[in-house]
Amino acid sequence: MKTLSALLRNLTLDDLRKWAGTTILNRSQSYIGQVKQLSRLEDGTLAAWVSGSEEYITSVCLDEKGDFDYDCTCPYDRGPCKHAVAVVLSAVEQVKRKNEIPLLTNEDDLYHSLFDGSEDDSADDDDWPDEDEEPDFASEAITAGRQGKPRMLKILEGMAKDTLITMILELAVRYPEIQRGILEKEQLATGRVDKVVSSLRQEIRSLTSEPVWRNSWKGEGNSPDYSHVQAQLRALLTTGHADAVIQLGQELWTRGNEQVAQSHDEGETATEIAACLEVVLQAVPLSSMAPAGQLLWVIKLALEDEYCLLDSVGKVLESTKYTQTHWHEVAEDLESDLTSMARPASATFSDTYRRNKVVDMLLDVYKRSGAPGKVIPLLEKEAETCRCYEKLVDMLLAAGEKEKGRQWCIRGFERTVESAPGIASGLQNRLRQLAENEKKYDLAATYRAEDFFARVSRTTFVALRQAAEQAKVWTAVREAVLRYLTTGRRPEPVDGGKSTAWPLPRPEFIRPRSKTGAQQVRFPDLDALMDIAILEERFDDVVALYQELRKIKRWGWETDKSVAEAVAKSHPQTAIDIWRTIVNSLISQVKPKAYEEAAGYLRRICTVYQENNRTSEWLSLLGELRREHKAKRRLMEVIDSLSGKKIVDSLR
């Protein structure tokens, strides 16, 4: 099995991220400086004190499978804590510096805080403290899984009651966290929940008022620690005080949202608050609120959730505790909210965002309340305001109301084509799918043509070709498309619906001509014509269009590369000239990396010369490059690699 020391030498941040997660890893990096007395045991286990809200005893070792195992006296219990990861990072730092991590001896306080170091389960009487002695007290948490009885437990079991009480009182004075923990347990046990709630409310207000920031470059920052809040909320819930948890949760929700909105810590604080609110959500079904009230409390928070603080809300909504009657009450409340909402100032996303969330939630509530019949009427009512045309059409088609769905597609398209082209495109696709389902292949091809004229590209051209071939009109459509790309005059069907020049019918909607793209393109569109010529393998046309395009336009190398690759066999000299131009440009950068890239194009040139029995020209090219750039040592090495015996022999 691999040792911990061997693992540390090759450990990466990705390894730690897989173990502890991104949030804990990021947080742990600011705790590296808080790792004190880093030591190792004989078996390779790492141990240290780590300063947080108090001093924690932390150890890290490898389990039988060679994976990290850890223990820490901090209250975090959802996986590896930041203290454990900080210990590993500190150890890695020492290994990289080639510093020896000291062996922990039985004379160290840390050693005794871990365990008594005995080889077996027995202990001599001399190891036990006298009743009037005060032992060195720390924590037993790390020792629980080790061989031998934990030293702290042995000590406590052997102490007289008065001595134990005295020691705890002194420690409570010395460590306020101990006093707080004892008082909180006593308050919960005796039903004095108001004291716990008051204290926890103050803690929430204090934590949410802290500035939250992180400087990743310097490894500095401040992130409030909500672990105690989470633990106390869980303790309240466990002892039957769900209403108190919800009361505190409301405060945390309000103030926590404000804090997260102003935070700059890569979401760490949001994650902490979300963990606390998960406990709050667990309290909802156990609270004294009526079932419908419980649902509404959760739903209205979810509608306000801008920072994903309530990821567990679905668990509450899916509970079988809630009946259709309860959901019906929720629906009535949300309907009232929607009615009272002011109409958005415009149909833009920002103005309709809130209303859309309520509508979406109400649609879900209708289904849960057994009232799916209310879904389509709601969508029809809100279609113009919320632009929920696509949802409406999908629901109509699912309900078998095909013609009504078609009309809403047309209506929605005409209202969104200029202001929300994404929605309009989705509605047009639905019209095309309807045409295909009805085997109206010419109409389906019309919509593919609409896509092409709006966004000329190889993708839209291929889609149009496939649709027109299915409609058996591709020859005429292709001629019209090429004519359009040459002249800029878009083909139109005659009043009867079709013409010999354009054999496709009109679309079912009216698209403003300003949205066709014709006014935004210079004609002839040589780029598109050349791309189509490459696609159709008309290589003479590709070369002619390329030469024409060079006269009027400059571009990057992508066009040159695609042309050269396309015509390398049909017009080898054109491909060689293009690649030679790229090679010269790369060499002029005078960078080793550019030389290597140039070598790739030279190899392509070599292949073309080889295929055309022009060996002497290839050797002449290499000689020319040597003469022109003989001072470029690294380039000469690249050229030598291209003129090796194997390459030369293959050319002869």
Image: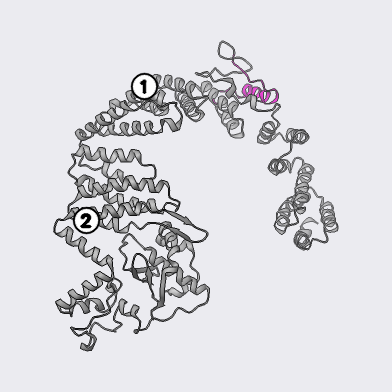
* Residue occupying image coordinates x 29% and y 38%: 299
The type of residue carrying mark 1 is Glu
Q: Is residue 391 visible?
A: yes
* Residue occupying image coordinates x 28% and y 45%: 250
Image coordinates for residue 326, horizontal then vertical, percent:
20, 35
Compare marks 2 and 1 and give the one earlier in the sequence: 2
Badge number at residue 196: 2
- Locate residue 642: give its quadrant: bottom right
* Residue occupying image coordinates x 30% and y 63%: 75
Instruction: Specify whether 560 is left or right of 25.
Output: right
Check the image and report above or below for 491 versus 630. above
Query: Which span of residues is magenta-colored?
Result: 470-493
Q: Which residue is mark 1?
A: 401
Check the image and report above or below for 422 versus 610. above
Check the image and report above or below for 10 versus 200. below
Residue 402 forms part of the magenta stretch: no
Image coordinates for residue 234, horizontal then vertical, percent:
24, 55
Q: Is residue 310 visible?
A: no
Q: Nearer the viewer, residue 460 or 158?
A: 158
The CA span between labels 2 and 1 is: 59 Å
Residues at marks 2 and 1 touching, judged by CB atoms closer than 8 Å: no
